[in-house]
Image (spheres, helix red, strand yellow):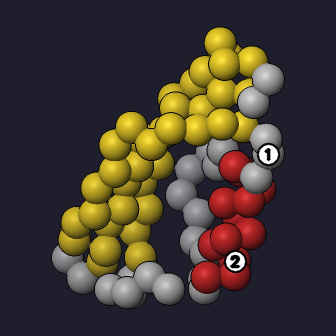
Amino acid sequence: MPPGPIDLTGAAETVSRFEQWFGGEDDFEILDASVGQVGTRLYLRWRVRMSSAGDPSSGRLVEQHAFTSRERIV
């Protein structure tokens, strides 16, 4: 996970970053998600429970917050 804020541009760059973080064989369950607006930016937040596919007891919680300068995400 990143140590702080990062700046990504475009769908391909964003997908690539998510694949780096979550592209393994982990299982995950979406616990909560929300979308809102802060000023002119779209705000996205989600919380997931992740565990190794072979070891359900290895669970961990991941929460992320994202802002985009576009109102539509493709």
Work out whether 74 lies above or below 42.
below
Closer to viewer: mark 1 or mark 2 = 1
Q: Which amino acid does label 2 sit on?
A: Glu
> In this rendering, does residue 62 appear at all?
no
Residue type pointed to by label 1:
Gly
Give whichever of 9, 73 is nearer the camera: 73
Place of residue 52 in the rendered image (x, y in percent of width and height, measured from the top left)? 74, 28
Per the image, the residue denoted by label 1 is 24
| Residue named by callout 2 | 13
Which residue is pictured at 37% across the width and 87% down the height?
72
Q: In this view, does 54 lie to the left or right of 49?
A: right
Which label number is shown at residue 56?
none
Q: Distance between the residues labelled 1 and 2?
A: 18 Å
* Residue that appears at 28% across and 63% down: 35
In which quadrant of the rendered image does the N terminus lie?
Answer: top right
Q: Earlier in the sequence, mark 1 or mark 2?
A: 2
